Amino acid sequence: MSARKKLLDAAAQLAATEGVQGLSVERVVTAAGVSKGAFFYHFETKEQMIGALVDHVSTIRMADVDADTKAGKPFADTLLKMIENELLEGGQLTGVCVSAVLLDPSLRDKLTARRADWRKRLIEEDGFTPERAEQLLLSIDGALIGTMLYNSGSQIENATKAADVMQRIVAEKLA
């Protein structure tokens, strides 16, 4: 495994448990088992690593979605499976993305592009109307942010409620 991947995997783990604000070069290199020199070979700053972390985490999550759609599953179903997993984890990676955007507003463009791709795929691959695709995406946005901000009560219960609402939107699209 490359030093860059080790660094990003370690940063993702630390950020998921402690938030982006808990990341430091020292903690990331220690967790990754690499030198500071390796860190600075791959990233000029901690902020640059956080930007790469958003891409890294997003790529990992979308690889599963893409594999499922290539196997013939509808994009909406595989997207919801990914979102439900994120909800069950308490929105930790959503928190990483939000924190990263607060540190570096230019990252918002990457997240906006990802969301636009989801919208396009819902319309083109699954036959959603633009309005129904937007409803589903807004419910996903709300569920992710709500889980991150208000992670109270049973995490599984909250994730299940959010997943049920999103599944109804998908089912109504098919009706």
Image (tube, rainbow, N blue to C red):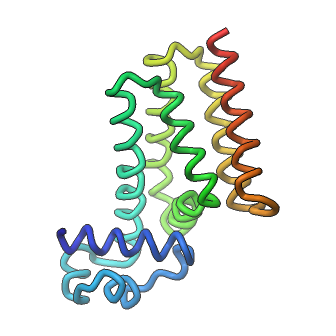
Residue occupying image coordinates x 73% and y 62%: 149
Residue that lies at the very extreme toward the right in this rendered image: 153
Instruction: Give the quadrant of the C terminus.
Output: top right
Q: Quadrant of residue 160?
A: top right
Residue occupying image coordinates x 23% and y 85%: 34
Whole-percent x and y of residue 50? 41, 69
Instruction: Give the quadrant of the N terminus.
Output: bottom left
Compared with 25, 105 (above or below) is above
Whole-percent x and y of residue 145? 68, 53
* Closer to us: 93 or 1: 1
Residue occupying image coordinates x 38% and y 33%: 68
Q: Quadrant of residue 52?
A: bottom left
Q: Is residue 125 left or right of residue 56?
A: right
Whole-percent x and y of residue 124? 44, 17
Compared with 154, 3 (above or below) is below
Q: Is residue 6 left or right of residue 131?
A: left
* Closer to us: 4 or 153: 153
